[in-house]
Amino acid sequence: MFPLKFTLLTFFVLFTTFSFSQSEDVYNSLFVPQELVDKANAVVRFEKNQVEVLGLDKIKITTKRITTVYNKKGNRHINAVLFYDNNRSINKMEALIYDAFGEEIKKVRKKDFKDVSAVSDFSIYEDDRVKYLDYIPLKYPYTVEFNAETVYTSTAFFPNWYPIDDYYVSVEHSDYEIINSAGIDLKTKKVNFENYNIKEISENHFVAEHVQGIKYEAYTPELKNIIPHYKVALKKFEMVGVEGENNTWKDFGKWMYDRLLTGTDEIPQTTKDHVKQLTAGVDDKIERAKIIYKYMQDKTRYISIQVGIGGWKPMLANDVDKLGYADCKGLTNYTKALLEAVDVPSYYTVVYGGRGLRDIDSEFSSTQGNHVILCVPSDDENIFLECTSQTNPFGFTAGFTDDRKVLLVKPEGGEIVHTKVYGADDSVQKTTANIIMDTSGSFTADVAITTTGYQYNIHEGIEKKTERDQKLHYKDYWDYINNLNIDNISISNDKDAIVYNENLQLTFANYASKSGSRLIFQPNMFNKVTQIPPRYTDRKLEFKIDRGFKDTDEFIIQLPEGLKVEAMTDSKEIKTKFGSYNFKIEPLDNNKLKYSRTYILNKGNYEKEDYKAFRNFRKQIVKYDKSKIVLTQS
């Protein structure tokens, strides 16, 4: 993945400001307007951010941020942290700490900030360090004034403005200003400014005032997609001594190809000969790509290495071939080189990886993304390869890089495309069971779970756990079944078909409850929805279902001799814009019952006014998943 330093820079808007005059009231927690304190872990009392463009290769960033913190969760929002390396230097850094009444209790100078390596646990080399305020408050609330000045000699990563840091953070005053001393053309974009109190003072100078904290609500889209922010990039920039042009994505992609990728894809002739031999006689290019992908997975492993042109240039494919490890950039570039050796075209692809769905902004070219994958073009649809995984099936991206806009880096320039969307019919979980009940209300069962698509992603990996951890997993999965014993587990992972198969033999005592001479039990034993989404009397935010799925269940239940059905819940069917649900219980021959159920959830973006109906849909599913069968003596 790309360096943590740039991900944080993009998200948090690091440190930009100069001197100003303000009232002493900003240090006293008693003077915070009550409406800003409500729903807030911290309040940004005053923030002045300033970015001065001094040249193609130099920007100066200053900040003054005064934050009142109300509880432990608010501590991190003082933002008293700076990364530095060979391309970023800290000229000034200090913090002043005040008690609840605005009395100064501590001053922390630059030398007193905690200074540690920013190398992650899975990295063998990163060249950046971090200085941060290490302060444990004795009581709340308290206030911190943080002052800093840094100079960047790489202008590819321009600090954008996010006046809101996170949920439950209010803003009394936040000021952002760009001073373009060098006169370099800027690209800018306002995002989500509407509905917030943001004033445009002049060109590239904005003030946000009296912004109440945002309360988190279930199914809310990613915060970045709903909060206001100001995007900025230079049309001509420099990344660690390498000049670039950035008018469009085509320009930016061309720069990446020419300056970051060209010359990095040479591999030894012996390796070329070997992969040609592996694919000899295979005419279909996708089949050749599958063979190469498996070869790469078996030969290499992922490890983070953040060096070379701001952490964006991949290590040489020759070195990856020799060492057998690399980061996402190196492994992707290496796989691309292997594919070229067997005449399969592919494209280095920049993406925001993560479980949340985050797009490369197709309307704003700049240094975006935190991860790299590989695109193999196909007549049907583009195939995307996750090169950091030693276990992923070929072309499988569900759960990390699916359903988002990404940047293809082609020789002729950049192109924005969309990765595979896994719809409800692609992400299926089928659960079947043969169940035998005894007269005491205990059960034995043979259960089979088959998953595809996103649901494959959720289940995949269980086979790697120890037997003990597997049993703990299934007891947690069926946590509503008391007295559950798992007698046997058999798992197969079909990577060619991308189907995950789980087969279990179970026993569970006293599942049915007794009421006099009757036995009462719930027939949906193995795929029950138990959680109802939170209720909001006045929901504020729209909501989103990121991924759809389809669950089908069929359980055959053998009743013991001497017992018959006295009563059972009637069949139910629900259809809504959010999805559908149905179940039924049918008598079969030989004193058997068949329970069948289908639950489909549709992906989509919905208005906040729809949330009550969505919650009611889920509430009904929880209710009907608890449907009962009453047995009595025959």
Image (cartoon, helix red, strand yellow):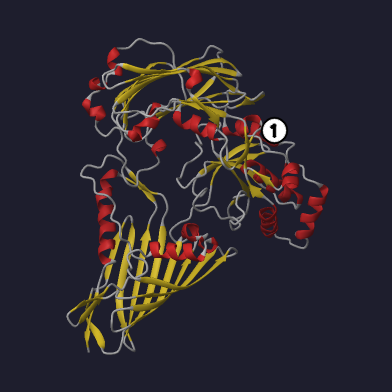
Q: Quadrant of the C terminus?
A: bottom left
Q: Position of residue 209 (x, y in %)?
A: 31, 22
Q: Is residue 116 visible?
A: yes
Residue 263 left/right relative to 540: right
Q: From the image, tell me which residue sits under label 1.
A: 258
**Residue displayed at 37% across by 69% down:** 526
**Residue displayed at 50% across by 29% down:** 9
Q: Position of residue 509 (x, y in %)?
A: 33, 76
**Residue displayed at 76% across by 46% down:** 322
Helix or strand or loop: what does disc 1 sit on? helix
Residue 488 left/right relative to 42: right
Q: Quadrant of residue 3?
A: top right
Residue 77 left/right relative to 158: left
Closest to the observer: 335 or 171? 171
Residue 274 left/right relative to 396: right
Closest to the observer: 395 or 514? 514
